[in-house]
Structure formats: C-alpha cells, structure tokens
Amino acid sequence: NNVETFANIPPIILKGADWFKSIGTENSPGTKVFALAGKIVNTGLVEVPMGITLKELLYEIGGGSSTGKPIKAVQTGGPSGGCIPAQYFDTPVDYDSLQKLGAIMGSGGMIVMDEDDCMVDVAKFFLEFTVDESCGKCTPCREGTRQMLRILEKITSGEGTEEDLYELEALGETIKDTALCGLGQTAPNPVLSTLEYYRDEYEMHVKEKRCPALKCKDLTRYVIDESKCVGCTACARVCPVNAISGEVRKAHVIDNEKCVRCGSCIEVCRFNAINKVSP
C-alpha cells in the first residue's frame, strides 16, 4: 500500500465506511490524488472525487494545455499506464473505466501531451523504465519487455516493418497474460494503448520512415532555407560536430550525415532560417 491508502484510514475510522462510500462512485468510492504533469497549465497534486471526468480534471482544474496547442493525449497510471486520446476525455476517472480504455489508475500520475509528442517515442520511454525495473524472476516480463523495447528502438530508428507492429501486439498480450506480478502484467499498456489509438503514427514510422511529431532523431533532419539565411555564421560556430558549412554572408548548408540533431543551430538562428523536417 502507498501513503495515500494509509492516509484514507483515519477519516474512515472516524466517520465510517458509509461516509467514505458517499463520495465517488459505487465501484470506486472515495477520492483520489492525481499528480498533473506535462503540458498542462496547473501542474501539481490535486485531490478529486472518483468519477470526475478526464475533461473536468484536465481543463477545469488543470487549466488546459500550457502550449496553446490542443491536448493530444493523457497518460495515466505511471510508467505502466496507458495513453488515452482526447476523444475519450468524457470518460469518468474510476478503476473500471480506465481499465476499459487500456489504462490504469496506478499511483495517480497524469502526463499531458500535445501534437509535438510522438506516441511511439512516448511508448518507448515508458518501456525503458519498465525494463530497468523488472526483477527478472519471470521470463515473460524479463525477456518479453526487452524484445518489445528492441522493436520500438528499431521502429524509431527507421528500420521497422509492418510485421513489427503485429509482433509488438502479440508480445504485449502474451506478457499481460503470463507475467507473475502487476508490473509485468501492466508493462505493455503504453505500447498496446498507443498501438490501438495512434496506429497511424506507427505506420508512418514503418511505411514512410517519418516521424510526424519530429521527435525521433533518426527520422528527422535539419535544413537551411537559403532565402532566409544571411550567412551570419552563428549556426556554424555553435555546431558541436562541424556539420554546417558556408561562406560569410552566403547561405549555409547542413551535412546531415554529420549532424547529431542537437538543435543548437535552431536556437541561435535569429532569422528562422533552419527547419527541422521528417522526410
């Protein structure tokens, strides 16, 4: 049990179980503390009654997107949680409803994402954590999550195939059904939920070798707009691998074979002449 569970015990003893069950829903009574994080205006801890909708939680309490861009998804339940798309934000926040969407309540973590977040990269990020946390006792979790991570790394590096998507799904379902503990049984959630709701992004990565959110480094490149570049040399001077060349007061060129996609050139360019693209 976590601290929140123990914190609920004193008021239940003082006021009784009926009082506690008067808050929330029939199957998910009481309140829940959520940690709002990511691209949301009001970050931090909030305590709300069970059954509140995601929309109320993210917009009325959280204040909506902090970037000015529409919220694309919210990841609930920590690293083993699932990613829920915006079309399901009318869903009540309770144990059963979240599970039906492929997510979990978990410890109450909620990470908000917008269109600049790549859902394939997000799934890989959370799976990396799970692989590190696996105790290694059971084969499905120990080896299965590693294989899923290997496939995600393959996809984000531009080497993925359509068969990899089916293999991810098969591995994920097998791990959920056969892992010994809760960690292993929920570990595939970030991958399976993003595959279900954002399969088009996965297909862009494997079919077109393109990352629409411009997050996957191996699927992006930097180009200089010759019509905007004034040849100030600021980008060339800041490049850590000398990937930018050109004469003073003439348009520069980026060698994408050398480029490490650090983004330093974009940060120093005063003329918005450098663009990050995914072919």
Image: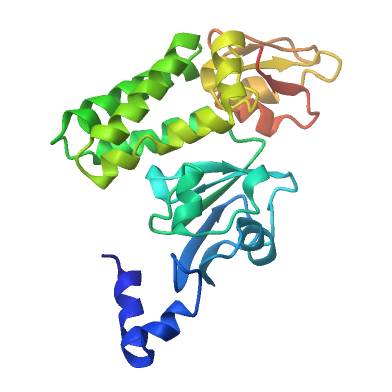
Identify the image quadrant of the N terminus.
bottom left
Q: Residue at x 69, y 26 (%)?
A: 234
Q: Nearer the viewer, residue 176 or 26?
A: 26
Query: Looking at the image, which residue is at 81% across and 15% down?
Result: 249
Q: Nearer the viewer, residue 6 or 270?
A: 6
Percent position of residue 130, x then y: 31, 38
Rendering quarter of residue 20: bottom left
Q: Kindly give the residue lying farthest to the left in the view shown.
A: 137
Q: Is residue 45 above or below residue 39?
A: below
**110 lies left or right of 153:** right
Q: Residue at x 84, y 20 (%)?
A: 228
Q: Farthest residue in the right direction?
A: 227
Image quadrant holding the C terminus, namely top right
- Where in the figure is residue 78, as x and y percent of width and height? 41, 49
Point out the residue furthest to the front here. Answer: 26
In the rendered view, how is the structure colored?
rainbow
In the image, is residue 190 above or below residue 1? Answer: above
Seen at 62% across and 10% down, the residue is 208
Q: Is residue 161 visible?
A: no
Q: Is residue 198 left or right of residue 166?
A: right
- Comparing 37 with 77, the one in front is 77
Task: State the image quarter where residue 180 is shown.
Answer: top left
Above or below, 17 relative to 241: below
Q: Position of residue 200 (x, y in %)?
A: 62, 22
Instruction: State left or right for residue 125 relative to residue 132.
Output: right
**Does residue 196 appear in this view?**
yes
Residue 56 position within the rendered picture, expressed as x and y whole percent measured from the top left? 65, 62
